[in-house]
Image: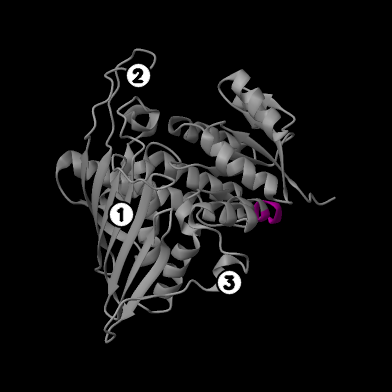
Amino acid sequence: MAVTRLPVAVIGTSWWADAMYMPALTASPLAQVVAVCGRDRSRTERFAERWRVPRACTDPQEVLDPELCRAVVIASPNDTHRELAWTALDRGLHVLCEKPLALTYADAAALARLASRVGATTLVPFTYRYMPTTRFVKRLIDEGYLGRPHHLNMRYFCGFGMSGEYLWRMDRARAGSGVLGDLGSHFLHLAEWFFGDVRAVACELGTLVSRPAVDPTGLPYEPADDVAVIVLRFANGARGVIHVSAVAHEPTPFAQIHEMDLHGSEGTLHHVIDWDRRQEVRGSRTGEDAIRVLPVPDDLWDGGPRAPVKATYHDVFRRQGKMVGEFVAAALQGREVRPDFGDGARVQLLIEAALRSAADGRVVGVEELESEVG
């Protein structure tokens, strides 16, 4: 008998699992969360009780079981992703894994190859690809609004690192990098989605806010970057700049703002989401004398009501079923969905190029790293 609901296990009980994955999975008529795994037993049991999940445990091996589930969501800290994803794929499970897939490009590429070999449905949740305004920008580019791409400038500013406390996301050994991978990964993915392959990367990283010299266990650690500026050279000749910061005061409901400027031979596009009042795309074609608002087409809202800006992610990921819901449907049908592990490995390649550029003080060609891994 065909399975009509996908049995899913969730590894991780963070605020993100609570705010994104559980609401999206429970909103999907095609998913059934059968187990949750976390490091702290009492927290995990409370999490399971709140979401009415029948099984709670602290050992991931218990849930990476094809007798229990057919798919797993990995929302644990970065340094656990590679091992968990590898085990899940090796056991025949479909996998949604938070970025980064692994702390190195070599490991991320190996995961992508394994996923392809076993025929698993995989997804790496680059969430901003799914926002209606972002999808509209992509549509306009594909329709030729910009003409030949010239350059893009993308900014993601937020303030989660302002306090100066220890954050595992700012611990180089646990996270792989700081804001470069945490926020920059999203816009690196969008940059290639918009303009195509990147051939070379230059990067400067900074640590502007002082943090404790030791982690909560008393051990010393290497603080990672809280600001990054990345310069891209695309295969089509276009240039790009991505500026990300975790130490920017942005007094909006989510304490962040996203802005993008894209230019080409035939036009200009400006995009902004401030998670408060502004969520829009503006543009102008060559020969026009003014920038005007370009209304987002109804179909990119799936015909539903347009949520207030700060509630857009509820609408997109719960009502519309984007990302998580699409992964569930694809896994049930045994088909691919994007962005997959190949896309996740590609972003990790760009992050590694940026890290090498910052360390060596030079422009790093993407092919240089690709040839090293083979």
Instruction: State the residue in front, 109 or 144.
Output: 144
Count of marks overlaid on the render: 3
Dominant secondary structure, magenta = helix
Instruction: State the residue in front, 178 or 261.
Output: 261
Residue 155, which numbered label? Answer: 1
**Magenta segment:** 329-333
Amino acid type at circle 2 is Asp
Residue 322 percent coordinates (x, y): 58, 56
Residue 338 percent coordinates (x, y): 53, 57
Instruction: State the residue in front, 86 or 298.
Output: 298
Q: CA distance from mark 1 to mark 2?
A: 30 Å
Looking at the rendered structure, the secondary structure element under dot 2 is: loop
Residue at 30% x, 17% y is 214
Task: Work out whether mark 1 precedes mark 3 in sequence or the reverse, and give the earlier one.
Answer: 1
Residue 215, which numbered label? Answer: 2
Residue 325 inside the magenta-drawn segment: no
Residue 68, which numbered label? Answer: none
Residue 145 percent coordinates (x, y): 37, 78
Asked whether, in this view, residue 241 is left or right of residue 126, the answer is: left
Residue at 26% x, 46% y is 354
Q: Quadrant of residue 105?
A: top left
Q: Quadrant of residue 307?
A: bottom right
Residue 299, which numbered label? Answer: 3
